[in-house]
Image (cartoon, rainbow, N blue to C red):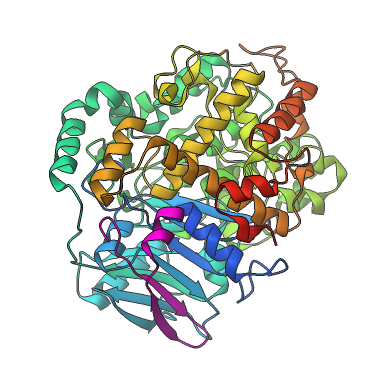
Amino acid sequence: MEGFAGKILRINLTEREKTCEFPSNEFYRTYMGGRAFIAYYLLKETKSNTKPLSPENKVIFANGPLTGSPLAGTGRNSVGAISPLTGGYGDAQVGGYWGNELKKAGYDAIIIEGKASEPVYLQITNGKVKICDARHLWGLKTAEAEAKIKEEMQDNKTRVCQIGVAGEKMIPYACVINDLAHFAGRTGIGAVLGSKNLRAIAVRGKKKQNYSNPEKIKDLSLWFKNNYQDLVARLSELGTSGIINNLNQLGGLPTRYFQEGDFHGAEKISGETLRDTILTKRETCYACPVRCKRVVNTGSPYHIDPLYGGPEYETIAALGSLCGIDDLEAISKGNELCNAYGLDTISTGVCIAFAMECFEKGIIGLQDSGGIDLSFGKVDAMLSTIMAIVKREGLGKILSLGVRRAAKVLGKEAEKISMHVKGQEIPMHEPRLKHALGLGYALSATGADHVHNLHDTSFILRVKSMEPMGILEPLPLTDLGPKKVRLFMYHNMWSFFKDCAVYCTMVPWSPSQVVEIMEAITGWNTSLWELIKVGERALNLTRCFNIRRGLTSKDDILPDRFFEAFSTGPLKGVQINKKDFYDALVLLYGMLGWDKNGIPSNAKLYELNLDWLIQ
């Protein structure tokens, strides 16, 4: 099949069995890849009571038709499982080069099941699979492990996907790492791999990709190369941290654990400051000219190993403004520690900031923190707490549970300030600035997520990207009326399609261009309508998965803090109106074909060709 390898690899670690499956063209066209692949196999092959860290859970690595094509933004793959952080559906996307290498090795996806009796890693070379001893890798930092694997494979072009020590210790927000500096950070899939004693998957492939219309793909690739500076020049120059000063001016930069929205030290940690001080080079993902990835290097007092890249926006805000810290070099050191040990920087930063507020409110004291002053702004407290989490020592042992479980351990006063949705810590985007973003946090099957979400700031002046879907009017940031709900619904269906086709949401291919790309890659006679339906199918698959896991509409909530007004800053007095918010949520259910309890109707599932889910 054009655009696909046409083959899925299944590995049972318990039995050390390796088998291949060859899905039909109809299967690929219905589910496509990425998120829908993952949800399909989890629904089909796990039970409602499967424990996330049991051998019965499955980890699915899934490419999409765009993965590995010579087009900007296509160096990505997805990985998912039952999340140990939320107990529901979990997945994350990651960039770099590993996904492309997997497709060149002959596979669209890998299904990992069972549990190895001892630590192992996988070698996949041009379709051949070998299960290797990884006891000598256990406990190593990620750079050390990757170097040993490449040495053993005797090929420096090998691409390595792995977990770190955090995954080995099954910390529920442990991440999966591609090429040392690209992260599937959210929902704790690294912990599931750790529970299976699987440290890494090393891949090398040389199979040539087949496309229906390679000349069209070449033309589109050349167009982007010639025009990307006009489209995303700021992203290329400053990386994702280029938004820090703007968010701060708007009052939407998460500060001091979401108590404030503007930070006095924002300029010190901005993308401009990073560019002018510690940036050494810009890196990229497969086939992408944008080069938005940062690489930093510092001397005293923090030596930063450039192998681990550099901090992006989410990390700078989570370990910086959220903790009241304006030391960019210290934040970069915190980023390096998380990368070396395999922790999601968003969840890590939220857990540390949570501890800081607990400390300042007297919920915990010096006797709980091991004598460390956990006041906001304390650099040493941030760095030492990261290591305490990795080691699961002292307060770090509690924080390593994630903010929801940590709050339960610390008591009711701590639970009142527990900032999560469905157990996943809130990302670094403020819903009191962008109201529909909060709607997305509440609805998301993976818990609070910023990637497949609507950012209201993108649609206050123009809606060009949504015009092909009939969305024609810009809308205010704080609007939660029917027109904003409609915009949200179509935008998110398109975002979920991206998660199935598997390409970067930061690269601004227009919907009409994506239709051309899909036709050129697969040869399908497709349309925007069909592609949106793929996204809607993915949304309903993950919704049904969570319903089966026991989640209900009562889990589609926001922390109370977002319904409270800011007391200072540009957004002083601004809050989300709770009634308007939940009215919008119920309206969204209706627009999606779900009942008032958020359950997809039989008619909707039939319409999406998902009637097998009804039972």
Q: Can residue 442 be seen in the rendering of this structure?
A: yes
Q: Is residue 423 above or below residue 614?
A: above
In depth, the one of 209 and 610 nearer the eye is 610
Residue found at x 81% / y 43%: 415
Judge left or right: residue 275 versus residue 426: left
The span picked out in magenta is 1-30
Q: Is residue 18 magenta?
A: yes
Quarter holding residue 519? top left
Quarter of the rendering occupied by the C terminus: bottom right
- Vertically, is 170 above or below 68? below
The picture places residue 272, in percent across and down from the top left corner, at 35, 24
* Rendered residue at 32%/31% (across/down): 512
Looking at the image, residue 163 lies above or below residue 387:
below
Is residue 600 within the magenta segment? Answer: no
User: Left or right: where does residue 365 sit relative to residue 445?
Assistant: right
Horizontal and vertical percent for residue 567? 73, 15
Q: Using the image as rendered, state which of residue 1 and residue 64 is in the foreground.
A: 1
- The quadrant of the rendering that contains the N terminus is bottom left
Q: Residue 170, image x and y in percent?
A: 60, 66
| Relative horizontal placement of residue 248, taking residue 62 as reference (left or right) | right
State which quadrant residue 566 falls in. top right
In this orientation, which residue lies closer to the viewer: 380 or 141? 141
Q: Residue furthest bottom?
A: 15
Whether residue 400 is visible to the viewer of this picture, yes or no, is no
Name the residue rendered at 49%, 53% in the picture.
35
